[in-house]
């Protein structure tokens, strides 16, 4: 399916977001509670009407052309999770600190919490759901995690997997230290790094053999 | 990192060893039942659920550290299209009183935390919750809310609160005390102020020691100090450290036919349901709690998070599902943290390093709300781990206007070990005793005693083989060679090695097992354990499968949903689970064997004892007639009563009975209570070894090598065990190398509240080939021999690094953890400790 050529807003009166500031002076009596750090994101969950300011675009996710209404300021993580039902991508911090939301964009790992969805039009997005092949055969790195019992709570796992797959595509034969550097943009709070590295090194080996 | 001839990717010691001799399942690696869903992204955590018409809600957090809300103005916010409701503290039900296991009514504390409050006691305390069609609308609405605050005094540093005339965190007090029996042991808030004289040594960086409500002593302390060859008296401070679970305490709720369905993370699927009933003040039977996957807990989600009732209440009010996403900054405020301890210890040593007496004093920063007992817990662990013949401990737990604390992996144990270990290292250097030898001479062994005497008798451990772990660990780490290496400094690089003992509680008893053999012949274990990724939720049932003699392929584990009928289960806190629930699983498997034999006797004649169970069959001893498990299950349904769950053994918990009743008729339904004998209290132990390299020109250091050698009883699942030993070790290391809170004491606001300001260790902070190993000696007081593992490594992680640092750069560099580059650099240049230990939050 080809992309809609003309990008129109679906609503002519886009919602404006007031500038929010948080000032320590709020401590003065009767201060207004500032909504610092709230997400300025709308959702259209399960058949709700498109929210104001959204426009229809097409993005390629896991090999499929997906048409989706997005807002200008909408992040890829939000689109994936709340509009395309791809909840394998996790939000751990929503501000490029933890890497739980890492996806591949044209085979390069990116934090999807800090990538605007409209910037990936025409590019190839891969999420954890797109790693295994259609017949259910696991990606070599996924298989390695199963074989090594890698990760504990696994909230960070999809991000690590995408980082590792992206890194290994460019660096198929890393040392343990090189691989650690390659996936160092991801945090594991269970701190299961040794077992993660075991699994990822095995994944590298499986990828080379595949 | 690779110089010095060390081979990269040398595999950890635990990796190639075989465990579980004589067992088919115990001690063997296997892919856990939850792994495929995790690795494909199909595993659903709380924020991954959707429901038709789902609304969103956002919290309004207090912008000030302590205030009373005079009025809130919500009309403008409610007028915004799409805003559905605003929940206030007045909408929160009064928490119900609860019954303890003895049937005693525990009154809800008047100081207890509520989901929303009209008197915020820390910056970040939730005040309101706004529900709307989406989060943007919630944010718009929050902009329009006006709140009038009456500002109240606040305090960030517990010592400031203890000063004469110092501020109290709440108007009615600043210090928690536990009333004397026969009053219920619920901590009460009272006011304690020390004298100016108590603070006389403060400026010299020595912890003041005024009145402390919690005190015990043991042996003759004066004689112990009198006979000492060396006495050290040191002050040391441990940091406040957030749990920072990667999954914040997001929750989603909806109601259906009068029942509440609640999705959130937890450390115990089973125990969270009654907690929700208490917070909601509602009938426990009207709650379905779903938590198949939880993104980390570490003590902060023992029964989930209190705030999960906010979407439940909004959902009830609005008759629509409500998702409450928690942001990382909100998680910093409401996500719990380990309390810092300011500690002072005077220790007497004999010439050989044997401890003759310990006098220990701790000030615990309890934060807002509940009393934290980390100081008392620290003393108990110290008394066990170093076996002093004489000891006095004094502890005081102070409330401050900082986020609420809770247990964090090895609560108190981690801090106690971090406080004492640097003193032991210093003593060893002063006495000329090898560091390992000094630990060895003080190391507990066998049925070791600990704590204060209660009614003339001290508690003792079930077993302790820590000396063996220390010896084997020292050999594996090449301790002698590394410690003797000269010179310690080459160019700007100084190397150091450190060793630490470590331990924490490792198990409880008395919970229930529940299984079903289905008419298809499958063995289905019901698991009430929370799924935190430690895999105990699955692993413990390998003990039951082993006892039944069935291959794992015919076993299923049901977990993560209270509507699936779960047995009475411990919370996964205090490293109880592996011990407690492997016992329960073992008990129910043996009860199942008995039931199978009874069914065979009823069906084929003879007595139950004429039969045996093997190869998924029950059959006459020596061969002959028998039933397959599938046939026996079908027969159980025909027999009914005690066999298919229409009747239940009287000694299991009433919730287990309810689950049995709900499973009735589905096959052979068996429940059993763990009644195995158990002499002593269960602890697990770790000997930790670290090597660091410090650049004395920059103060930067990194960890070259680490080994954690564990005494955790029988190894159940090596891969999961290794993950726990090194994972929790690294959680401990974080306290040594960088994690801490920073506050602006003038405004009472946190400065470090995100990952980049308060970062847990990354993969680059630890060696790429950290090592673990375990003795695999069964604990004699539990049938499976397995003890818990989560918490025991934590203190050793922190202390081994601190000890390695002081070996590298000397004793007079740091007086508090974490030790940062600037700590090292400035102190080395000035030739004295440059960071005042008691200036908290700076």
Image: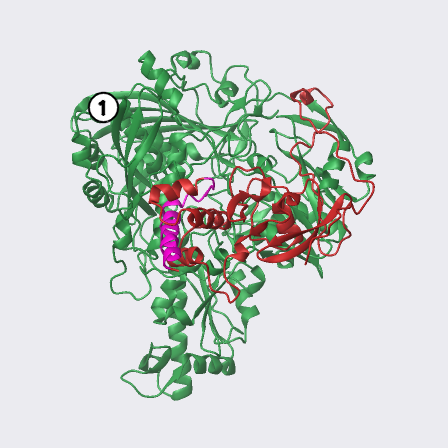
**Which residue sits at x=34%, y=59%?**
B29
Establish if B524 lies above or below B619. above
Q: Secondary structure at mark 1?
A: strand
Question: Is A29 one of the magenta-colored residues?
Answer: no
Task: Using the image, name the chain to which the residue with label 1 belongs.
Answer: B
Quadrant of the image occupied by residue B44? bottom right
**Which residue sits at x=51%, y=49%?**
A107
User: In the rendering, at what x and y percent does residue B758 appear?
Assistant: 49, 31
Q: Is A162 displayed left or right of A112 in the figure?
A: left
Q: Quadrant of the N terminus of chain B?
A: top left
The residue pinned by badge 1 equals B489
User: In the rendering, at what x and y percent does residue B211 appear?
Assistant: 44, 22
User: In the rendering, at what x and y percent does residue A26 appear?
Assistant: 69, 22
Q: Nearer the viewer, residue A210 or B420?
A: A210
Q: Is residue B509 visible?
A: no
Q: Nearer the viewer, residue A109 or B260?
A: A109
Q: Is A61 displayed left or right of A141 in the figure?
A: right
Q: Main secondary structure of the magenta part?
A: helix
Quadrant of the image occupied by residue B382? top left
User: In the rendering, at what x and y percent does residue B194 appear?
Assistant: 47, 17
**Label 1: few (<14), some or many (≥20) within 10 Å?**
some
User: Which span of residues is magenta-colored?
Assistant: A185-209
Chain in red, by letter, is A
Q: Is A1 displayed left or right of B706 in the figure?
A: right
Q: Is residue B736 visible?
A: yes
Establish if B75 lies above or below B283. above
Establish if B197 lies above or below B255. above
Chain in green, by letter, is B
Establish if B364 lies above or below B779. above
Question: Is A186 one of the magenta-colored residues?
Answer: yes
């Amino acid at each position: 399916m080809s992309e809609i050529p003309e990008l129109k807003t679906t609503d002519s009166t886009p919602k404006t977001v007031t500038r929010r500031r948080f000032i320590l002076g709020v401590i003065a009596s009767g201060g207004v509670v500032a909504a610092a750090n709230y997400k300025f994101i709308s959702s259209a969950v399960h058949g709700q009407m498109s929210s104001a300011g959204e426009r229809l675009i097409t993005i390629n996710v896991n090999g499929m052309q997906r048409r989706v209404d997005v807002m200008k300021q909408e992040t890829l993580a939000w689109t994936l999770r709340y509009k395309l039902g791809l909840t394998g991508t996790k939000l751990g911090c929503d501000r490029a600190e933890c890497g739980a939301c890492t996806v591949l964009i044209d085979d390069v790992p990116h934090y999807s919490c800090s990538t605007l969805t409209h910037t990936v039009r025409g590019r190839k997005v891969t999420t954890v759901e797109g790693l295994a092949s259609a017949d259910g055969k696991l990606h070599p790195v996924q298989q390695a995690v199963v074989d090594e019992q890698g990760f504990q709570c696994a909230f960070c796992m999809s991000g690590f997997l995408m980082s590792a797959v992206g890194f290994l595509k460019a660096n198929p034969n890393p040392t343990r230290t090189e691989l650690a550097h390659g996936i160092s943009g991801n945090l594991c709070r269970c701190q299961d790094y040794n077992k993660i590295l075991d699994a990822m090194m095995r994944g590298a080996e499986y990828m080379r053999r595949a | 990192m690779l110089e010095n001839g060390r081979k990269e990717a040398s595999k950890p010691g635990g990796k190639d060893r075989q465990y579980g001799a004589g067992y088919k399942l115990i001690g063997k690696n296997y892919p856990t039942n939850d792994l495929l869903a995790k690795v494909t992204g199909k595993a659903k955590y709380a924020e991954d659920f959707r429901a038709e018409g789902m609304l969103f809600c956002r919290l309004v957090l207090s912008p000030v550290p302590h205030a009373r809300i005079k009025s809130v103005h919500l009309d403008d916010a409610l007028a915004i299209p799409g805003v559905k409701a605003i929940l206030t503290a007045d909408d929160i039900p009064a928490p119900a009183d609860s019954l303890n296991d003895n049937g005693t009514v525990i009154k809800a504390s008047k100081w207890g935390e509520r989901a929303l409050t009209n008197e915020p006691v820390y910056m970040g305390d939730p005040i309101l919750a706004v529900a709307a069609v989406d989060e943007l609308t919630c944010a718009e609405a929050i902009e329009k809310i006006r709140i009038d605050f009456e500002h109240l005094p606040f305090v960030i540093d517990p010592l400031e609160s203890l000063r004469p005339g110092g501020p109290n965190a709440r108007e009615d007090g600043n210090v928690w005390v536990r009333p004397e029996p026969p009053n219920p042991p619920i901590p009460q808030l009272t006011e304690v102020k020390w004298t100016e004289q108590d603070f006389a040594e403060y400026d010299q960086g020595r912890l003041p020691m005024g009145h402390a409500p919690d005190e015990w002593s043991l042996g003759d302390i004066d004689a112990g100090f009198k006979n000492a060859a060396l006495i050290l008296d040191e002050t040391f401070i441990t940091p406040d450290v957030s749990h920072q679970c990667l999954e914040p305490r997001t929750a989603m709720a909806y109601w259906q036919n009068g029942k509440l369905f609640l999705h959130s993370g937890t450390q115990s699927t089973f125990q969270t349901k009654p907690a929700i009933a208490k917070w909601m003040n509602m009938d426990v039977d009207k709650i379905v709690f779903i938590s198949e996957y939880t993104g980390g807990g570490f003590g902060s989600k023992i029964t989930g998070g209190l705030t999960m009732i906010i979407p439940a209440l909004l959902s009830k009010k609005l008759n629509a599902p409500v998702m409450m996403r928690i942001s990382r900054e909100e998680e910093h405020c409401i996500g719990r943290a380990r309390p810092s301890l300011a500690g002072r210890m005077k220790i007497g040593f004999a010439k050989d390093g044997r401890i003759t007496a310990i006098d220990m004093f701790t000030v615990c920063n309890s934060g807002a709300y509940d009393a934290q007992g980390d100081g008392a817990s620290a003393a108990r662990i110290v008394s066990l781990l170093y076996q002093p013949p004489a000891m006095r401990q004094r502890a005081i737990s102070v409330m401050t206007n900082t986020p609420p604390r809770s247990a964090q992996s090895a609560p108190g144990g981690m801090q106690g070990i971090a406080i004492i270990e640097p003193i032991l290292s210093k003593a060893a250097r002063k006495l000329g005793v090898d560091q390992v030898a000094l630990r060895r001479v003080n190391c507990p062994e066998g049925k070791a005693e600990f704590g204060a005497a209660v009614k003339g008798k001290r508690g003792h451990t079930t077993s302790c083989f820590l000396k063996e772990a220390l010896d084997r660990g020292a050999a594996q780490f090449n301790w002698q060679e590394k410690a003797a290496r000269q010179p310690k400094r080459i160019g700007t690089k100084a190397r150091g090695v450190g060793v630490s003992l470590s331990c924490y509680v490792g198990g409880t008893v008395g919970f229930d097992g529940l299984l079903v053999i289905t008419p298809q012949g499958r063995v289905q274990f019901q698991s009430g354990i929370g799924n935190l990724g430690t895999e105990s939720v699955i692993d413990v049932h390998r003990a039951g499968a082993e006892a039944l003699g069935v291959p794992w392929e015919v076993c299923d584990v049901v977990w993560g949903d209270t509507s699936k009928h779960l047995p009475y289960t411990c919370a996964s806190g205090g490293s109880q689970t592996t011990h407690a629930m492997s016992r329960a699983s073992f008990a129910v498997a043996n009860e199942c064997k008995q039931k199978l034999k009874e069914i065979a006797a009823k069906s084929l004649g003879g007595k139950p004892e004429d039969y045996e169970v093997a190869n998924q069959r029950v059959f006459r001893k020596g061969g002959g007639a028998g039933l397959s498990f599938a046939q026996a299950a079908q027969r159980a349904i025909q027999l009914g009563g005690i066999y298919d769950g229409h009747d239940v053994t009287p000694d299991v918990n009433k919730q287990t009975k309810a689950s049995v009743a709900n499973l009735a008729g589905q096959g052979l339904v068996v429940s059993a209570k763990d009644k195995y004998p158990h002499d002593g209290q269960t602890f697990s132990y770790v000997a930790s070894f670290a090597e660091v390299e410090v650049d004395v020109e920059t103060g930067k250091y990194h960890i070259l090598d680490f080994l954690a050698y564990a005494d955790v009883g029988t190894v159940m699942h090596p891969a999961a065990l290794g993950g726990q030993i090194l994972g929790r070790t690294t959680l401990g290391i974080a306290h040594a190398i960088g994690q801490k809170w920073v506050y602006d004491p003038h405004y009472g606001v946190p400065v470090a509240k995100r990952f980049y300001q308060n970062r847990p260790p990354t993969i680059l902070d630890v060696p790429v080939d950290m090592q673990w190993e375990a003795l695999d000696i069964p604990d004699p007081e539990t049938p499976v021999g397995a003890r818990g593992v989560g918490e025991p490594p934590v203190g050793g992680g922190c202390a081994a690094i601190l000890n390695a640092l002081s070996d590298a750069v000397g004793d007079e560099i740091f007086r508090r953890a974490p030790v940062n580059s600037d700590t090292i650099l400035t102190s080395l240049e000035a030739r004295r400790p440059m960071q005042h230990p008691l200036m908290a939050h700076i």
